[in-house]
Image (cartoon, rainbow, N blue to C red):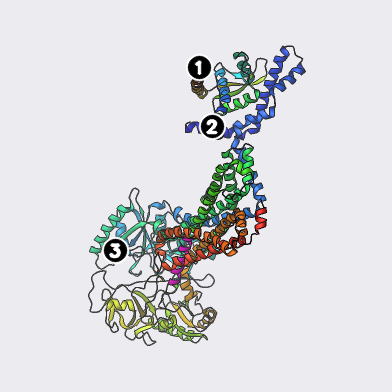
Amino acid sequence: MQAGSIWKRFRRRLRYWLNQSERQRLLWEEMEFHIESMAQDLVAQDIPEAEARAAARRKFGNMTQTSEDARVAWTTRWMSDLWHDLRYSFRGMRRDAGFTVFAILIAGLGIGASSTVFSVVNALLLRPLPFRDPVRLVWISNGNESTNTQTEHYSDLRALNGSFSDLAAFADWGVGNRELTGTGDPQRLTSVPVTGNFFAMLGVQPLIGRSFTAEECRGSYSAPPAMLLSYNFWRRQFLSDPGVVGRKLILDNHPVTVAGVLPASFDFGSIFTPGTQMDIFVPWPLTDQAKPRGNTMRIIGRLKPGVTVRAAQAEFTALGKQLDKQHPERNGIIPRLMPLAQHVSGRARPALFVLSCAVGIVMLIVCANLSNLELARLSARQKELAMRRALGAGRFRLVRQMITESVALSCCGAALGLILAVAGTRGLAHLHAFELPLLSTVQIDGSTLVFILLAAVGAGVLFGLLPALQISELSLRAGLEDAGRGSTGGKRHAWIRDALVVSEIAFACTLLVGAGLLMRSFLRVLDVNLGFQPERAAALRIDPSFRISRLAQQNSFIDDVLHRARSVPGITTAGITDVLPLRDDRMWSVSVKGQFYEKDRHPEPYIRVVTDGYFEAAGIPLRAGRVFTERDRASSEPVVVINETMARTISPGQNPVGQTITDYRRQHVLGLVVGVVADVRHASLEAASGPEMYLAMRQTGDYAAMQLVVRTALPPDSLAAGIRTALRPIDPNLPVREFVTFEDLVDRAVSPRRFLMLLLAGFAAFALALASLGIYAVISYSVNQRVQEIGIRIALGASAADLQRRIVLRTLGLAALGLALGMAGSRVLSSALGTLLYGITSGDPVTFIEVGTVLIAVAAIAGYIPAWKASRIDPMVALRSN
Amino acid sequence: MGSEKPKADLLPGTLDMLVLKLLMRGHLHGYAIAQLIQQLSDDLLRVEEGSLYPALQRLEMNGWIEGEWGLSANNRRARFYKLTPDGRKHLTEESARYRQVTGAVARIMGFA
């Protein structure tokens, strides 16, 4: 039959089915006409009318039966059968409440976990970014994915390229630096300078108001004339008052016009700076000479229709070389292009892949377990099934009945899973501390619901299939006899159940290995030598609310702050820095006096501007020379402290103390190296630190923030209020809100890793529990099957210990087989963990040995319980039971 | 359904074919179809009403016949059926198949 006619038939059937009652009535009328005609024919043969009617009716037979039969043509048999099967299933579920609850519980946990993971995958990888035509957006970085580009290069690239309809950019430096006053308490806003065309290029329209005008984009960098508010900030600070648009707010002591409010769908932070919320956007005047120099721009481009990323990359590589040659005075430029979506979700990809695999394996274990339980139930129901068979139920019909039962069960599980998934995604979307892009958009949407439905039906069919196929093996006679006690019966049965248990153990093994590897990596990461001591150290942001214009003014502020902070009881030492470890970073190119460098071969240390006391407060040990003192001031000789890596870079094998560092163009001296301190892990716990250089804060004004770092004798949290009180006399408007302990910084840096590890550990524990249950069920079943045989053995003098040993050995045999398969599988799969591992290889023998030991131990316990029960079988009872 | 034997289909299948064949003559209602089968087979074949109406529903569902309401010879509302083009095609196929089968049976039985 062709597809067209099948479709036509389906439509007709549906129409008939929808008009059921009307058609029923018409059919009845048609049959009445038939009877009437028959009666009239009889009357024509001179039979009295009443008799004729009765005869006609008799002849026609059971009208209801006929109409029922006729109706089958359109209601279709399978629908009514389905209804019967469902009703039967639910009756069965009620009868076997224990099994039902257990099955719904584990199916629900499995489906809940997998749909939560799916909704994250959906938000990060499947759903398009919330911009106009997002597939044409490209992330353009410099050299490697995270390096920025100089503004001059941006302007040239924008003017010269032919691949993009437009380029736009936002600043990566100077974020979070604006102070809002005049509306309640002074507060610091996270602001992002963006190029004037940024929103237009992405296709984002302000919710109210307008975007920046060309004139606003020509203002000064430090005092922008206009700003756009993010939706969240607008809601929080101005309670969604549309009247704020057009008003002037005081930002860093300058009036700034609110040009507009951005829509809720544009969540800049969750896409470009996961973990940080952005409050306001200000125009970035590229013409202003006072704007920050160096690599500060993150560029996004919109491809012209028909241009591929590869073609654009080729053009930009050539352009980069050309610009490098034309402008030797600028920083190097090696454009690197990748689709924006890939940049945004790229870092989360390995973790999501691992999680998806993990939930997939969990679902398989759930199915294997339910299959096993269904098989056990099946042997108890053999008689019932054989009876139904004998009464005429077709084999296919029984198979369908079994599958309907299992799908009904898993759909009940899915209902529970949906509840869990809603809770899970809610929890995830509110994890602000977690640096995963687009996390706030994680939710249960239509596609997740479809996923849940598919998962439920798929799981139901999967775990119902094996038991259902077993029915075909069912022999009628054996079933109707007192089934299941034969010593040889169901050999094939046992084989399948064993195979299921082996696969459960193998799957659990892979999950345990994965979780074990991540756990050991996590411990290794925590063991890393950070270069600073996070215990009892904390930082408080203390930027003065007034403008500091001269170094002398700045230094008296610093002196005052340090003096007051150090006199707070419980504080042992205090210092000031501009960037905190594991949070902020910036990098300069420098030169060492008397050395020659090729272009782009200059040392590029990370720059930190600190005062005396910082190294002691943060716990960074001194390796050589000295650290800063109060005497390193504007009037004295400029000095710098470098870390060990920098020391190795600039003077391999020699003492770096006494060398002079200049900026890379050798125009002014940055300082004389006076000391070497330990390397600090600044970017992440996993990555080794690069070269670092500390400038004395009292000698420079080139920094973006002031963080007071204190080391305390008491828990740091208890001192926050004390420090605030102590500092208030210096500057009553001091917005001292951002208090953070160094332990929090470390904690935040490891949170994604810990989160992934905990999830995987949770899955592994669930899998282990299910596998041990599976072992227990199978061994118990085989013991029950062989009660007679065991009874005979005991009667013939087998000792309890002997029996137990035999049963436990059989268990261990299954476990060993599962373990071997699982280990082999893990060895292959664990390489997918790749970048998520730290300090160990994917074949880490310790993990594999530990997992093996745990699994064998659990299997031995799960097998010992039925073994112990078996050894207590009373031979007399066992032999009489039949 | 898998467990039903093809042999069991033969009779209803034949009835379908007979109904389609009769409808080649024009529009007929159920009673007329039953009567005609009986008359044309010289009372040899009797159609059970219990299987005629399900058969008519089935044929209509498959799109081989179409029913519409009209008035019978004695002015009563009756449902008349007519053959659709699909039904015509199906009838041709069915009669060819039936001829083959009966021919084969006849050859084996030595009737031919």
Q: Are marks 1 and 2 in contact (CB under 8 Å)?
A: no
Residue A19, above or below A337: above
| Residue A586 covered by magenta stretch | no
- Asked if badge 3 and badge 2 are on a common chain, one would say yes
Secondary structure under badge 1? loop
Marks 3 and 2, how far apart in space? 66 Å
Magenta extent: A508-525
- Given the image, on which type of amino acid does mark 1 rest? Gly
Q: Which residue is mark 3?
A: A333
Q: Residue drawn at (63%, 58%), measured in percent from left and top?
A: A795
Residue A85 in the image: x percent, y percent? 62, 42
Residue A533 in the image: x percent, y percent? 44, 79
Which numbered disc, 1 or 2, marks the residue closer to the eye? 1
Residue A826 in the image: x percent, y percent? 43, 60
Query: What secondary structure is the magenta-colored segment mainly?
Result: helix
- Asked if badge 3 and badge 1 are on a common chain, one would say no
Q: Is residue A60 left or right of residue B18?
A: right
Disc 3: host chain: A
Q: Which residue is mark 1?
A: B110
- Given the image, on which type of amino acid does mark 2 rest? Arg
| Residue A522 covered by magenta stretch | yes
Q: Which mark is residue A9?
A: 2
- Given the image, on which type of amino acid does mark 3 rest? Ile
Residue A493 in the image: x percent, y percent? 54, 49
Secondary structure under badge 3? loop
Which numbered disc, 3 or 2, marks the residue closer to the eye? 2
Residue A453 showing in the rendered view: no
Marks 3 and 1, how far apart in space? 96 Å
Whichever of callouts 3 and 2 sits on the residue coming sooner in the sequence is 2
